[in-house]
Image: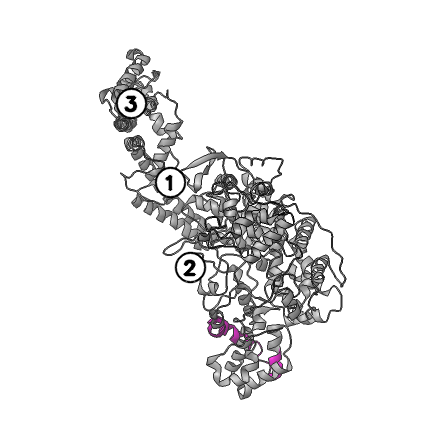
């Protein structure tokens, strides 16, 4: 049944009588509420019927998460469940049923306070399952993909896809809907593949083509159009949580200069039909594939880098883990950040194995140029200005970080004192904090802690600190004096190292200057010992800096030369002093750090000024006409230390060491996951994801493609194939598509052809009461779902019909999508702001750019109708649309031309008559024709795809 809902247009009330028939098409307010039963089942099946109940109500406390497990009971494992709670064939003797139905609130499961009791129907399902033997099944998504046998059917089936669908329909006494007309079919195909309606000429050519392969040629033509990549690239950008701003800004926002290079990469990849395994691998590890330094494919790494730029680095990595696992494999691995996954076999250790994979990579200070830029005057001017701004920033960073490091070397006492007090390890997640000179820097404190921990107890300088650190407070002073005498004795005669100004001087076992400082100011506590060390290092550094000045002045022309081993050079030449300075200046020591890290610790005023200079570089990249496109790449380095589990997600509560490897649930039960090699961890991860033996990746992808064609996937939860997912409506068809997708070499275009040439795709979207009563949710696909165009396709289609769409300009920097007058480019090139979501985007359910979106929400709200009636955008498009036919003098011919352009069909007799009546005597009035065009653009037929 074709139901359309009329919208009352108050501003046109005086003419509503003549407009009634046309207004009946107006869309943006359609609501469909279908009643009826779900698909029944002859027997209770574990994956389809039982597992969802257990996942929803039981596995939180009786599932994979060991920390949350109650009563030492696991219901996700057959042996464990049957050992405690299930007696196969005897539901009344099973503890599971007993706890579900008991009247004792202390024993009832789930506990009443959870507010999630099982329904009587769910309890009965579990009863029937146990009565039948309580057979478990492996979760369907983790089972290997096997190409199933194509079923035979009684009715006519053109393709294998049809056989899988028709066999299920016939089992329920149902059938496919009749095929749509050719004008409807080409419109459906065109909007699906390129996001634009067909021209009237294209419709006529298809309708008049008697060849049985006519539709196949239509598909091929659309797939070869550059518009195809723009349409399907936009779909993929939802998965990749693409945006042009960093996100998280409370006031204002910061833009990516080069996010568009990832968007353009995706569009080009779809147009080129890049094999899926290569497509995935480039997005995770293009930098590890041996590509040239300016290869455009490097822009693929935007998949990892274009997400929200959290201030907390752990959140950035969590976002990367989520987009890879949920977007590519349909698993909510990020749920295991703080604990084992509640429902799926994903331990916390697996999460941190992926953390180790991504944490080994960083973004370079300056990304590489994509391709070879033309040597234009604009590019030459850009290079000159860029160098100027880089030098200004580099000068300030070099000088100010040197000042900051020198101050830190005078502040050793402050950090040792905190360690002596027992100050715990600092959480460095808040790396955006600003400082004053006398502020304690958490990063430096942690560096001192780690550094001292790694030193041996016989270190000549910090050995005394290490040995005294375990001494009890009430025994500290006495024990310190005892050890001091031992150390002095072990050093022997001081005369053996008295000639400290000589370059050949040597050192004893313990640094004499340390012992002298302890003896001169005997500490009675660890805090006082910290002050002793701090005072000694401050004096040492003061002498070093003064000595540097003195020896430098000795090189001034006209000044008497002093020999290198002169006694005045003792602060420099002394091996004792050099032994101390090693702990201040040696690479890897707490106060010796590179400029990049040191710049994060600068005082606020200095840091703000440096940010301004770096911001000037960012602004040049963002807006200068000569700024070339650059790839937002990553570079991987070998980590200095192993990665560990963050216990309960706390980065300063570290547990066991983890190695980077793939998910254990997707690894052979007889083997342990292979460790990803250093320097190529992301590549190894990509290879594991696209491995033909991975049961998830291809299922997830072909399901996502099916969803774009039918509005819903064979699995209705496209980003969650875990135990809480809805099972596939057609599991054999899903595996068949996954198998043939592999056989095609991962060709998405071939997958399109396979789906679109089926009767299932080409059937109508007409209602059938009998089928609706039997299958209310159309899970069996007895009709083609009617779908509303997404915002991008709606906007682009209006521009196309109005004759304004510019398809010649492809790629490049984004334009302002909401600008007025409208920029006539395809919407995929519009600026995406994740900080400030426009009301238009939220009204029409645009994807949330803060997270991976495998399926956009579907809402029907009054604002959609208000847009249809009042938006300047649609009014301007209507005016341009009406002008296209202004030269047609015959009213009826002009009306027909407008219908043909908007809908790809001529108007019916009733529509022609209603339009004629609406135009009335004002047929020469341009405003009246604008209103007619407005109605056509705002109609259900234009906004929805049948």
In the rendered structure, does residue 676 fall within the stretch colored magenta? no
Return the x and y of residue 395 as percentages of the image width and height.
36, 41
Local SS, label 3:
helix
The residue that label 1 is drawn on is: 427
Q: Quadrant of the C terminus?
A: bottom right
The residue that label 2 is drawn on is: 836
State the residue at coordinates (52%, 78%).
Answer: 930
State the residue at coordinates (54%, 70%).
Answer: 31
Q: Which residue extends farthest bottom?
A: 921
State the residue at coordinates (48%, 85%).
Answer: 14
Return the x and y of residue 412 as percentages of the image width and height.
30, 31
Q: Callout 1 environment at 10 Å: few (<14), some (14 to 19), or many (20+)?
A: some
Instruction: Report if residue 212 is visible in the image.
Output: yes
Query: Is 825 positioned to the left or the right of 191 in the image?
Result: left
Q: Quadrant of the N terminus?
A: bottom right
User: Magenta part of the protein: which range?
Assistant: 867-896
Query: Is 156 positioned to the left or the right of 432 in the image?
Result: right
How many marks overall?
A: 3
Q: CA distance from mark 2 to mark 1?
A: 30 Å
Name the mark nearer the viewer: 1 or 3. Answer: 1
Q: Callout 3 environment at 10 Å: few (<14), some (14 to 19), or many (20+)?
A: many
The residue that label 3 is drawn on is: 571
Name the mark nearer the viewer: 2 or 3. Answer: 2
């Amino acid at each position: 049944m074709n139901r359309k809902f009329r919208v009352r247009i108050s501003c046109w009330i005086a003419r509503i009588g003549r407009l009634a028939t046309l207004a009946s098409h107006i869309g943006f307010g359609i609501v469909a509420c279908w009643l009826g039963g779900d698909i029944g089942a002859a027997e209770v099946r574990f994956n389809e019927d039982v597992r969802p109940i257990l996942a929803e109500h039981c596995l939180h406390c009786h599932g994979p998460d060991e920390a949350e497990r109650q009563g030492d009971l696991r219901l996700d494992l057959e042996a464990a469940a049957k050992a405690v709670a299930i007696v196969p064939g005897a539901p009344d003797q099973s503890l599971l049923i007993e706890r579900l139905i008991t009247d004792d609130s202390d024993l009832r499961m789930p506990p009443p306070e959870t507010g999630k009791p099982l329904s009587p129907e769910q309890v009965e399902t579990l009863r029937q399952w146990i009565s039948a033997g309580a057979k478990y099944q492996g979760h369907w998504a983790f089972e290997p993909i096997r190409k199933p046998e194509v079923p035979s059917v009684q009715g006519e089936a053109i393709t294998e896809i049809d056989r899988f669908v028709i066999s299920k329909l016939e089992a329920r006494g149902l059938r496919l809907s009749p095929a749509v007309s050719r004008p409807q079919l080409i419109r459906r195909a065109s909007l699906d593949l390129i996001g634009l309606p067909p021209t009237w000429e294209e419709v006529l050519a298809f309708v008049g083509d008697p060849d049985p392969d006519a539709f196949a040629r239509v598909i091929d033509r659309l797939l070869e159009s550059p518009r195809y990549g723009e349409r399907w690239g936009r779909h993929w950008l939802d998965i990749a949580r693409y945006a042009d701003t960093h996100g998280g800004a409370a006031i204002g926002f910061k833009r990516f200069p080069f996010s568009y290079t990832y968007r353009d990469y995706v569009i080009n990849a779809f147009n080129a039909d890049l094999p899926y395994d290569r497509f995935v691998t480039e997005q995770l590890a293009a930098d590890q594939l041996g590509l040239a330094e300016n290869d455009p494919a490097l822009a693929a790494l935007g998949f990892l880098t274009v997400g929200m730029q959290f201030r907390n680095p752990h959140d950035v990595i969590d976002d990367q883990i989520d987009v890879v696992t949920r977007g590519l494999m349909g698993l909510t691995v990020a749920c295991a950040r703080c604990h084992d996954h509640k429902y799926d076999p994903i331990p916390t250790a697996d999460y941190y194995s992926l953390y180790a994979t991504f944490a080994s990579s960083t973004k370079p200070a300056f990304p590489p140029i994509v391709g070879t830029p033309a040597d234009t005057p604009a590019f030459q001017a850009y290079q000159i200005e860029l160098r100027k701004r880089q030098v200004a920033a580099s000068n300030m960073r070099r000088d100010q970080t040197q000042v900051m490091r020198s101050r830190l070397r005078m502040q050793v006492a402050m950090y040792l004192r905190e360690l002596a007090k027992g100050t715990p390890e600092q959480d460095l997640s808040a790396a955006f904090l600003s400082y004053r000179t006398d502020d304690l820097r958490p990063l430096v404190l942690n560096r001192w802690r780690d550094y001292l921990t790694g030193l041996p107890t016989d270190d000549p300088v910090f050995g005394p600190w290490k040995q005294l650190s375990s001494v009890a407070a009430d025994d500290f002073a006495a024990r310190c004096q005892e050890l001091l005498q031992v150390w002095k004795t072990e050093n022997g005669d001081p005369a053996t190292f008295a000639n400290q100004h000589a370059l050949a001087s040597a050192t004893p076992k313990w640094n004499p200057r340390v012992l002298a400082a302890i003896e001169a100011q005997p500490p009675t506590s660890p805090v006082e010992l910290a002050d002793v060390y701090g005072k000694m290092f401050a004096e040492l550094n003061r002498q070093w800096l003064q000595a540097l000045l003195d020896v430098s002045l000795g090189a001034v022309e006209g000044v008497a030369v002093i020999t290198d081993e002169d006694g005045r050079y003792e602060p420099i030449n002394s091996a004792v002093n050099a032994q101390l300075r090693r702990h201040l200046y040696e690479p890897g020591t707490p106060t010796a750090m590179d400029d990049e890290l040191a710049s994060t610790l600068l005082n606020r005023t200095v840091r703000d000024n440096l940010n301004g200079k770096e911001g000037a570089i960012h602004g040049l990249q963002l807006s200068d006409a000569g700024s070339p496109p650059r790839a937002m790449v990553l570079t991987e380095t070998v980590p200095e230390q192993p990665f560990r589990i963050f216990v309960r997600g706390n980065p300063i509560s570290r547990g066991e060491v983890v190695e980077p490897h793939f998910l254990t649930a997707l690894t052979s039960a007889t083997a342990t996951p292979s460790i990803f090699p250093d320097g190529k961890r992301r590549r190894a991860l990509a290879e594991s994801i696209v491995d033909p033996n991975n049961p998830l990746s291809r299922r997830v992808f072909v399901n996502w493609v099916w969803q774009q064609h039918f509005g819903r996937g064979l699995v209705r939860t496209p980003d969650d194939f875990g135990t809480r997912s809805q099972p596939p409506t057609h599991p054999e068809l899903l595996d068949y598509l996954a198998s043939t997708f592999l056989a095609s070499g991962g060709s998405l275009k071939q997958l399109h052809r396979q789906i679109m040439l089926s009767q299932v795709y080409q059937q109508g979207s007409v209602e059938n009461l009998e089928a609706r009563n039997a299958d209310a949710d159309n899970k069996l696909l007895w009709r083609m779902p009617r779908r509303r165009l997404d915002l991008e396709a709606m906007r682009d289609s209006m521009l196309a019909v109005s004759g304004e769409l510019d398809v010649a300009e492809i790629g490049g920097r984004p334009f302002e999508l909401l600008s007025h007058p409208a920029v006539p480019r395809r919407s995929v090139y519009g600026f995406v702001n994740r900080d400030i979501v426009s009301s238009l985007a939220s009204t029409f359910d645009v994807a949330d750019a803060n997270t991976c979106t495998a399926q956009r929400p579907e809402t029907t709200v009054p604002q959609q109708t208000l847009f249809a009636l009042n938006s300047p955008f649609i009014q301007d498009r209507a005016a341009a649309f009406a002008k296209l036919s202004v030269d047609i003098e015959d009213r009826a011919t002009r009306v027909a031309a407008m219908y043909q352009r908007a809908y790809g069909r001529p108007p019916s007799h009733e529509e022609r008559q209603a339009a004629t009546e609406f135009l009335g005597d004002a047929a020469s009035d341009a405003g009246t024709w604008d209103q007619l065009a407005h109605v056509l653009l705002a109609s259900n037929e234009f906004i929805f795809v049948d």
